[in-house]
Amino acid sequence: MPESRAAVASDIESATRDRLLERVFLVRARGSSVVRELRGGLVTFVTMSYIVVLNPLILGSFSAEGPGAKRDVLGAVLPVPQVAAVTALVAGVMTLLFGLVANYPFAIATGLGINTLVAVTIAPKVSWPEAMGLVLVDGVIIVLLAATGFRTAVFNAVPAELKAAISVGIGLFIAFIGFVDSGFVRRLPDAANTTVPVGLGINGLIASWPTLVFVVGLVFTGILAARGVRAAILVGVLVTTVLAIAVEAFVHVGPSKGTNPRGWSLGYPALPERIFGFPDLSLVGHVSLGAFTRLPLPTVCLLVFTLLLANFFDAMGTMTGLGNQAGLLDRDGQLPRVGRALFVEGLGAVVGGAASSSSNTVYVESAAGIAEGARTGLANVVTGLLFLAAMFLTPLYQVVPVEAAAPALVVVGALMMRQIREIDFTDFSIALPAFLMIVVMPFTYSIANGMGAGFVSYVLLRVATGRARQVHPLMWVVALAFVVYFAEGPIRAVLSG
């Protein structure tokens, strides 16, 4: 009898928990399940956890000495361990917040491209706290644009066929990321002296064990996906990681560290000596607005404008592609509650600047979790908690090499290509802008660049074919903004001259 009561109490507790999850995240309403959400959140973390290793290498330095140190105008550097800690902290907090407020499975972390812009273009002109201050200002502007509804209006003004092209372009982009990260595609050493900028592996051959592991992992994951195996991507990543550990144990490839082209790029497939360590969060609050007094105002405004455009459209494109892949867009091709999503995503730049991790944005690698069935913010809760745990467990998650996660990106890229059927290629005024969006994203390694090429060409071709009235007024504004964005170099030269 007591056992029966205990069973009843357990059933009631379970039912109450399920109702709570459904009320908060709408799991069943979106055709998902708690298991799928948990699995999707784990896969998303695995495919994007590399940022906790990569961002410190882009922004930080191990010392202020040497030619590779990222020194600011005062000669100071950001220490790598501290950057790793705040990168994981902000990614965890913002991913959790996005999942709880926007209820979408779109994880957030430091934006690639923007962090390089900060390290290479902005920091040499100002101090590191001042550079992060400009990122914070950029974030405040984005939040204000989202709060006023302007960002949502721009999002909804994009034609449905161009939104489909964004999805396809992002698919090719993340597949290209997978190929490059794995070493399957590499820049040729003498690229400046040849008409072929990239090639297969090393000297046209798959000449490294890590790249071979990637190929085997890609084939294995592809077979699982083709056979409709549940958790195909997660199983693929785990099995490929085990394979990488076995290869390293027998062959002793070693890490790349920029000097060993046949080594593991990021992450090292060997059991770590320790799995726990306390994070150093001393960079939190290390921010200043002194750039407005250090540099001429037009120069500061141009730097902020560049950050603004990259942030503004990169996230919009990513959310469009992810929403399309997850089947979350409504009949009009719009993402419901997009205003909330854009507002929280904008906070990523504010929080990232305040914590010195650089601007945080929605990550395209979330597509891997979506492919595993994630449809709600519950997946984000999982990913966010794992990022917070990563602050303490960095040695453990670094066991997964990027070559083991890269096959998931390629498979997801192939899945996202299905959106191309929604584009009318018989109408060249749509075909060319869509084509430019699709190819410029991977070719320039930038979602924003691809969107800019597509938007500008779309407006020009509509005008040239006598259909200017079909162009939404906001598309004119966006196209003009991208013209300024692409002409930034000449404009900066004029201002500095």
Image (spheres, helix red, strand yellow):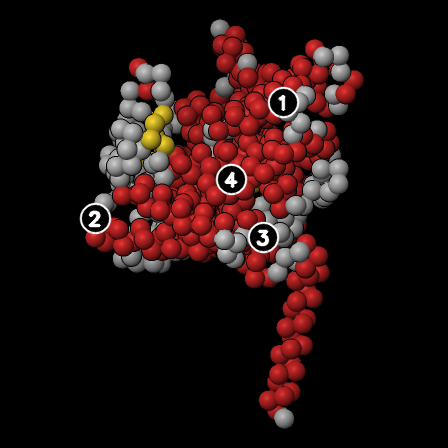
Q: Nearer the viewer, residue 341 or 7?
A: 7
Q: Secondary structure at mark 2?
A: loop
Residue 199 in the image, given as x and y percentages of width and height: 34, 27
Task: From the viewer's perspective, tell me whether residue 140 is left or right of residue 173.
Answer: right
Residue ranking furthest to the right? 469
> Which dot, 4 or 3, sits closer to the camera?
4
Total numbered labels placed on residues in the image:
4
Q: Which is nearer the N-term, disc 1 or disc 4?
A: 4
- Residue type highlighted by circle 3: Ala
Residue ranking furthest to the left? 251
Tag 1 near tag 4, CB within 8 Å: no
- Residue under label 3: 374
> Which dot, 4 or 2, sits closer to the camera?
4
- Residue type highlighted by circle 1: Ala
- Residue type highlighted by circle 4: Ala
Task: From the viewer's perspective, tell me whether residue 249 is left or right of residue 72.
Answer: left
Q: Nearer the viewer, residue 3 or 133?
A: 3
Which numbered marker is on residue 414? 4
